[in-house]
Amino acid sequence: MEYSKTFYTKELQTLSGTLIIEGPLSGEKMSAYEFHEDLVAFRPPALQHKALIEIADLPEGRIFIARENETIVGYVTYLYPDPLERWSEIKMEDLIELGAIEVIPKYRGASVGKNLIRLSMEDDSVEDFIIITTEYYWHWDLKGTGLNIWDYRKVMEKMMSAGGLVYFATDDPEISSHPANCLMARIGKRVPPESIQKFDQLRFMNRFMY
């Protein structure tokens, strides 16, 4: 597969100030920016910054950020699914995962997540890929936002839909373990039928178990 990394950038005006939305970035560029201390959803900030730098330099890795001056305050990642997840069991070159999205509390409600996803979908090369995201309620900041599970789920669906991702059914055990969890995906216009068939096989791997 060819992995296009055409750079895009835009300004986003918010009530808390002007942000720059940009990407995909190289690991070198990622390392030149500060990483906000409130980006703690997945691991301690220093470790997450290091992980994003490594992802940025993968052939398929794409990182888009929101920054306030020289400090990263939000990001979205794209890379191949984790080898331990079912989505990598059939080796598909044209299936990429939106692996993580995070915005600091100061800028929540300012459509930063939506703008990150929209900008990341501007490159025509996304039409060659199936892009998936797996939403698990235990990753959601319910305490920090004050939202209940179902309201948070609506927020996530609305944000992902800004990039053309829609709900897809699956029998994946982790997703099926709670009704708020879900699989969303965007199937590019140039994805061949055989890849869509493989994706369907991945979604329903348990259908012949009984």
Image: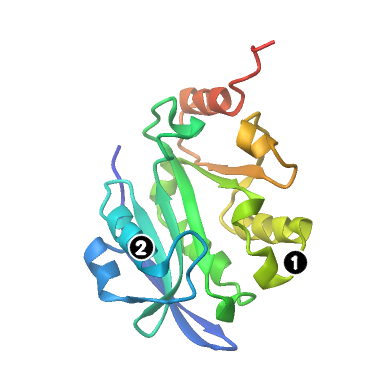
From what the image shows, is residue 77 above or below residue 129?
below
Residue hosting label 2: 47
Given the image, on which type of amino acid does mark 1 rest?
A: Leu
Is 131 rendered above or below residue 111?
above
Q: Residue at x 56, y 55 (%)?
A: 163
Location of residue 38 in the rendering, given as x and y in whole percent from the top left corner? 49, 75
- Indicate the quadrant where residue 114 lies: bottom right
Circles 2, 1 touching at the beta carbon (< 8 Å): no
Q: Quadrant of residue 203?
A: top right
- The quadrant of the image that shows the N terminus is top left
Q: Position of residue 159 (x, y in %)?
A: 62, 60
Amino acid at circle 2: Leu
Q: Nearer the viewer, residue 170 or 19?
A: 170
User: Residue 64: x and y, percent?
Assistant: 40, 64
> Distance of mark 2 from mark 1, alpha carbons?
27 Å
Q: Position of residue 118 (x, y in %)?
A: 52, 62
Counting other residues with Cα less than 10 Å from the Cα at mark 2, is it few (<14), some (14-19), or many (20 or more)? few
Q: Which residue is mark 1?
A: 147
- The disc at residue 139 is none
Q: Which residue is painted at 69% across and 68% down in the image?
A: 143
Residue at 53 percent of width and 23 percent of height: 197
> Left or right of 192: which side holds 54?
left
Residue 184, above or below 42 = above
> Quadrant of the image for the C terminus?
top right
